[in-house]
Image: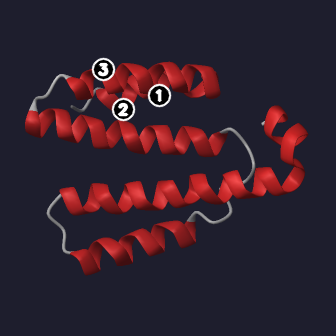
Amino acid sequence: MYILYSTWGFNGIYIVTLLVSSLIAITLFNILIKQNNSLVISFIISLVAMYLSRGVFAARNQIFSFLIFELEIYCLNELMVNGKKRYFWILLLLAFLLLMVHDTVYPLFFVMIMPY
C-alpha cells in the first residue's frame, strides 16, 4: 500500500479499494452461481452481502485477505467437482499470497480447508 500511496496518492488507494471490492462481489456471485442457484437469487444475495459488508471495505490489507479467502472457496469447490490438479497449485499460490499480504490470518487458510 505504501508504494501505491507514494506513486498515486489517495486516488490510487481509492481506486484499488474499489477494484478489490468489485472483485470480491464478482467472485461471490460466481461462487453462488456454481452452487446451482439462479441468476436472480445469486445477484440478490451478492447485493445484500455487499451492502452489509460496506463498512468492512477500507484501504487495508484486510480486503485482499477477503478476496483470497473467496478465491480459496472457489478453488476448493472446483477441486472437489472437477478434481483437476491445477486448482491445488492455485491453492498453494493463494496460501503464499495470503502469507505475504496478511500473515496474521494465515492459519485461517487451513481452517477453511478442513471441511473439504
Local crowd at mark 2 within 10 Å, few (<14), some, or many (≥20)?
A: few
Q: Which residue is mark 2?
A: 112
Q: Which residue is mark 3?
A: 89
Camera sees residue 102:
no
On the image, the x and y values in percent for residue 71 come to 39, 41
Residue visible at 89% across and 49% down?
9
Q: Is residue 95 left or right of residue 51?
A: left
Question: Marks 1 and 2: CB-CB under 8 Å?
Answer: yes
How far is the residue under mark 3 from the one under mark 2? 17 Å
Residue closer to the observer: 78 or 106:
78
Q: Nearer the viewer, mark 1 or mark 3?
A: 3
Farthest front residue in view: 7
Q: Amino acid at mark 3?
A: Trp
Which label number is shown at residue 53? Answer: none
Q: Nearer the viewer, mark 3 or mark 2?
A: 3
Residue closer to the observer: 102 or 19:
19
On the image, the x and y values in percent for residue 5 come to 86, 42
Q: Is residue 41 left or right of residue 5?
A: left
How far is the residue under mark 1 from the one under mark 3? 18 Å
Residue visible at 85% across and 47% down?
8
Q: Amino acid at mark 2?
A: Met
Question: Marks 1 and 3: CB-CB under 8 Å?
Answer: no
